[in-house]
């Protein structure tokens, strides 16, 4: 059963490695958080990655913090060099947890990539989605959680 809306954000502890951070990041309270699950073997993850990065960049000064979790789907996805290449190629600068043992994914009750979890300023789940269709709803939900008007409104 997927994580229910209103659930407190689970711990990010348990990654087998952290990239762009020495350990699980300490997230600032009172900020909106996007947790993005992806895998190097996932075609849709690659298709949406530039848009995820654009959202990160667009809203980080407005109170969004972003964490990426690499969740391998196959044994070859555990190759850290492949993960590092994708991090470089897509300019992923936010902390990246490499979740080779699926400890974080299990805590988030997530089995999909790409998957997106938006937590509000209260630290509770406001929205979750998976796949490219689900990703289309991520930015409006982030804007809503940040208290920004809908696109087309006054920013």
Image: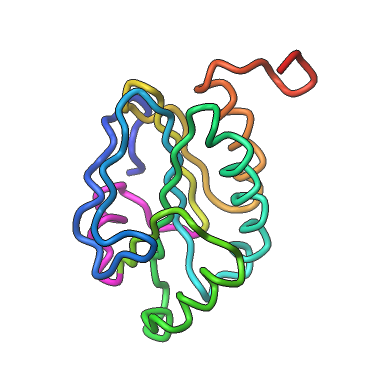
Which residue appears at 49% of the width and 60% of the height? 113
Q: Is residue 73 above or below residue 26?
A: below
Colour option used: rainbow
Q: Quadrant of residue 42?
A: bottom right
Q: Is residue 41 left or right of residue 15?
A: right
Q: Quadrant of the N terminus?
A: top left
Residue 94 vertical position relative to residue 4 in the rendered view, above or below: below
Would you say 135 lies left or right of 13 here? right
| Main secondary structure along the magenta-highlighted residues | loop
Query: Where's residue 92, x and y in %?
Result: 52, 60
Total marks shown come to 0
Asked whether 53 or 101 is in front, the reply is 53
Picture coordinates of residue 28 (x, y %)? 31, 33
Placement of the C terminus among the 4 image quadrants: top right
Horizontal and vertical percent position of residue 138 = 58, 37
Q: Which residue does the image show at 58% across and 62% down from the upper left?
A: 91
Q: Which residues are magenta?
A: 100-113
Residue shown at 39% from the left, 62% from the top: 20
Q: From the viewer's perspective, is residue 123 above or below residue 38?
A: above
> Which quarter of the picture shows residue 89?
bottom right
Query: In the visual, does 129 lie left or right of 8?
Result: right
Q: Is residue 24 magenta?
A: no
Residue 53: image location, x then y, percent: 60, 51
Q: Which residue reaches farthest right?
A: 152
Q: Residue at x 39, y 65 (%)?
A: 71
Left/right of residue 88 with respect to residue 128 in the rendered view? right
Q: Give whichever of 130, 77 is nearer the camera.
A: 77
């Amino acid at each position: 059963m997927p994580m229910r809306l209103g659930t407190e954000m689970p711990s990010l502890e348990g990654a087998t490695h952290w990239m762009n951070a020495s350990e699980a990041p300490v997230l600032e309270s009172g900020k909106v958080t996007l947790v993005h699950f992806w895998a190097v073997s996932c075609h849709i993850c690659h298709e949406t990655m530039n848009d995820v990065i654009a959202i990160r960049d667009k809203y980080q000064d407005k109170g969004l913090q972003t964490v990426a979790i690499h969740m391998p789907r196959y044994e070859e996805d555990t190759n850290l060099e492949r993960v590092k290449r994708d991090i470089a190629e897509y300019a992923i600068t936010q902390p990246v947890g490499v979740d080779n043992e699926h400890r974080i994914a299990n805590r988030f009750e997530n089995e999909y990539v790409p998957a997106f979890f938006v937590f509000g300023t209260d630290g509770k789940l406001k929205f979750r989605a998976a796949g490219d269709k689900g990703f289309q709803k991520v930015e409006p939900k982030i804007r809503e959680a940040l208290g920004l008007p809908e696109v087309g409104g006054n920013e």
